[in-house]
Image (tube, rainbow, N blue to C red):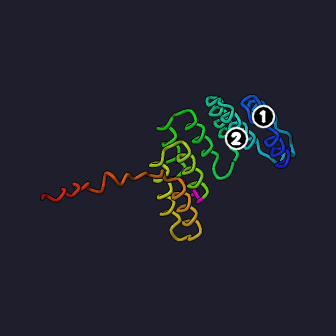
Amino acid sequence: MSCDDLEQVELSAANDARGQRAVADLLHSWARRAVPGDSVSRGRLFVAASEHAAFAGDARRALRLAREALATGDHVAPDTRCYVVSALLVCGHLREAVALADEVLDDPGADVDVYLQLGEEFSWHRQPEEASRIYTQGMFRCAGDEEATELLLGAWRRGRTPRTIDLRDRVPVLPSPAAPRD
């Protein structure tokens, strides 16, 4: 199993739930039986299977597969736990997702990619306050790295929920002038 093999399988997936489930099944079966010489880790295969299960609408399976990826001990960039956070959000387990994200971010090895992925996950799942908190924390952590700070600032700007301002509520309506009296 190589990265090219994995990419080919993922790209060949049908865009419907049935096709996504089939790819998740295939990747899961490959992850369960590792072959010496594979260049793709079991953890990466479990993560890919989890993502396809989520696309198929099977949130519980996505979470189970993401946890299996974590249990392998394999590192899946930027951090395997980020994929568990994603699956928790798919399942609607916000508190657990926030707690695990905080654990990941408290890790001294957390880099800009971790902040970007977690911020994007929370933003995608309509949690803009949590995404903003993560991006801000990342900007403080990466303060000496101008490129990382710019990446985080750009992601934060893209993820903000646009607000519509109704100017009619802010501009006082003045009474129309009275008609002149004769």
In the displayed structure image, the side of residue 65 where residue 35 appears, left or right = right
For residue 115, above or below residue 127: below
Q: Residue furthest front?
A: 182
The structure residue drawn at horizontal position 33% and vertical position 52%, both measured from the top left corner, is: 168
Q: Work out whether mark 1 precedes mark 2 in sequence or the reverse, and give the earlier one.
A: 1
Q: Real-space Cα distance between discs 1 and 2? A: 12 Å
Q: Position of residue 13 (x, y in %)?
A: 79, 37
* Residue that label 1 marks: 23
Compare residues 78 and 72 and report the one nearer the observer.
Answer: 78
Q: Quadrant of the N terminus?
A: top right
Give the amino acid type for the residue marked by disc 1 in the picture: Val
In the displayed structure image, the side of residue 180 where residue 83 appears, left or right = right
Q: Quadrant of the C terminus?
A: bottom left
Quarter of the rendering containing residue 67: top right
Quarter of the rendering containing residue 23: top right
Quarter of the rendering containing residue 147: bottom right
Under circle 2, the secondary element is helix
The structure residue drawn at horizontal position 55% and vertical position 49%, both measured from the top left corner, is: 104
Give the amino acid type for the residue marked by disc 2 in the picture: Val
Q: Position of residue 77 (x, y in %)?
A: 68, 52
Q: Position of residue 111 (x, y in %)?
A: 59, 59
Q: Is residue 107 magenta?
A: yes
In the displayed structure image, the side of residue 39 where residue 81 appears, left or right = left
Compare residues 160 and 114 and report the one nearer the observer.
Answer: 160
Circle 2 residues within 10 Å: few <14, some 14–19, many ≥20: many
Q: Which residues are magenta?
A: 106-112
Compare residues 84 and 147 and report the one nearer the observer.
Answer: 147
* Residue that label 2 marks: 47
Q: Is residue 176 magenta?
A: no
Chief SS of the magenta region: loop
Circle 1 residues within 10 Å: few <14, some 14–19, many ≥20: many
